[in-house]
Amino acid sequence: MYEERIKTLIAQMTINEKAGQLQQCGPSLVGAFEVSFEELLDMMFDGRISQEEFGRLMSTAEQDFHEEDLKAGLIGSYNGIDNAATANRLQKIAVEETRLGIPLLFGYDVIHGFRTITPIPLAESCAWDEELWEKTAEMAAKEATAAGIHMTFAPMVDVAKDARWGRISEGAGEDTYLNERYGAVKVAGFQGEDLTKKNAMIACVKHFAAYGAAEAGRDYNRVDMSLQKLYEEYLPPYEACIKAGARAIMAAFNDINGVPCTVNASLLTDILRKSWGFTGVTVSDANAVAECVNHGIVPDRRSAAKEALNAGMNIDMTSNVYSENLAELIECGEVEEDVLDQAVANVLRLKYELGLFDYPYRTDEKREERETLCKEYRGLAREAAAKSMVLLKNVGILPLKKGTRLGIVGELANAKGEMTGAWAIGADVEACISLVDACRIQNVPYTYGAGYEEMMVNKEEIKKIAAESDVLIAAIGEHKEESGEAASRADISLPEYQVTMLNYMLETGKPVVAVLFNGRPLAIPEAAEQIPAILEAWHPGTEAGNALLDILFGAVNPSGKLTTTFPYTTGQCPMYYAHINTGRPGGKSKFTSKYLDTPLEPVYPFGYGLSYTNYEYSDLRIIKKKDAARITVQVQNAGRIDGEEIVQCYVQDVSAKRVRPVKKLIAFKKREIKAGETVSVEFTVPFDKLGYFNDEMQYVVEPGEFKFYVGKNSEECLAESIVL
Ligand code: BGC
């Protein structure tokens, strides 16, 4: 549509201006505190500065936007601009003071909300709620575009089966299909139907590809896997996002089978463009083009630029390797100008699609103020947080009766800043509501005490709190920096002092409810055994405390279900439900596939979650149609409270020429079911979804028995087979 205009523009550009369009720049702080945006992020993530300080520095410290380069047409986009005034000021320079007046593109990590923070993606995926996913993405787009942002580096759809990997918090968990749905819906929510609308934000899907399969769960680590596994389990979510219209995609830091994704032509060109028909922009991860030297795949930055561009990497995020080297590489003929032109065309196309050439300023400070943290957004954040929580255990304690006096123990209950999760750099931390804040605001009687730090766990204090309370709430889990990027853990159990704290609480004889704040599955076998009620709250976002009270006191009936397996112990990782059977599946006899020192089963399986009512499944029927299986099941709300049930449908190819998973999610539906009501839930599963990649990498649907499982989680299902 814009191809003629793009061609005409490119014909007027110098090589340096072209390279400039491919250069994404991060602002640096100057003055007393001289660091780049990436270093500042690094400081926040490793705890040298708090998120509050990060926010303060970003809004108050003097920043260098490399304006000389901008005026010379050497910067095409920025990462990290977070307010309308700065965005418009820089845009004005680009449009009015550069030779060709090409507008800038502003990217930012709007991962689960911008200022108003919704639950971390792993949490929100537990809502299995497409409508909610879309609404929260739309809200994030409204708030972020009001601050001048054009593109978010989201959704992350890296299938993650290893709880050690900290970035499991940023995606929809371990399942391929769930990540497909989550990703596609997020893309729709961020981008809307028309990119020229001022509320629309480009979705940059990440991290292409298979970043979640990092060996040993260690961030940035290598990925080595069969092509069949890559195509069946890891690629589909990225493809689903591209099919949903995502206009940008970020390459992953890792290598796949020896080739870093940043310079991986088979991913960036063959799969992405030739097979999937992608016409948008590819973006490197931060500094990743330069890091190809560390990978040992190129001798220097110059070769990194050459390999990356030739492989199909369009935008170099902040490593400056393109601006330093592309002109010379073209002169020497090591990179064809045509390749450069194609990359530039992809960037310009996005700018045209956003309408930036006609309307470069899509917001102003008034709109920004109006659309930041408004009441409506907070309401949605609260709803999303409550829907994302997963009730893991409840032996007759929850919901609490009105007037119950709470004895709250653990610093996480009183830590606003911890509620946002790791990737919420735009968060307004002061606006967050902790559990203690919520009790105060809502006049819930409570006593709060005891700290998060080991030395502050005080038995006497816990006894005192218990004496003044009806129910004890233990706030345990992880600090937000314990999950997310560069936050892999080799031990995912609770720290010793939290176990001690729980024991002291149990010793008081008062009922104990454990509320878990965490960004990954934790290994909690003892707690699961001893604590009578456990609520997985994750890092719930701005409205954390209010949403928690909604669940604890029963204003909202919990409906979330896990999208990630909770192992017994770290040694079982990676642990996931869709595993294959060995020739010796775990059993009583010694020579079967199992561990000597830990059970084979998880503590909580994929798909698991309780509510204040209970659901009964019956009458599973499968009708074989021409091209699809029609599956129906009756689900009864057998309790006395209305609720929402997530009905899950799995399939197993019972015998095939390649080993197949014991079960694989193929469809799900979330249904409101009134107390006492029975609903009929129907799924249609096309037969062409039942295939796999054979030895020759052809997708085949093999005739034979297919067993369908329908139920409330991956373990408790009704089952029925058909033969194809
Ligand atoms: C992360 C990306 C993120 C980028 C830009 C990187 O460190 O891996 O997920 O989008 O930074 O801030």
Image: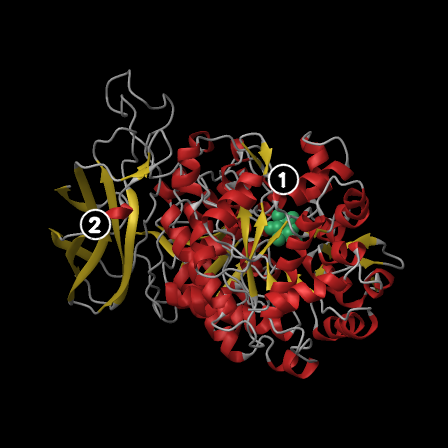
Q: Which residue is mark 2?
A: 710
Residue visible at 57% across and 68% down?
A: 201
Q: Which mark is residue 192?
A: none
Q: Which residue is mark 1?
A: 263
Q: Is residue 26 visible?
A: no
Q: Amino acid at mark 1?
A: Val
- Above or below 580: residue 350: below
Q: Identify the mark nearer the N-term, 1 or 2.
A: 1
Question: x and y percent of residue 639 in the render?
Answer: 19, 63
The image quadrant that residue 642 belongs to is: bottom left
Q: Amino acid at mark 2?
A: Val
Q: Secondary structure at mark 1?
A: helix
The image quadrant that residue 98 belongs to is: bottom right
Question: x and y percent of residue 680 in the render?
Answer: 15, 62
Q: CA distance from mark 1 to mark 2?
A: 42 Å
Q: Are marks 1 and 2 in contact (CB under 8 Å)?
A: no
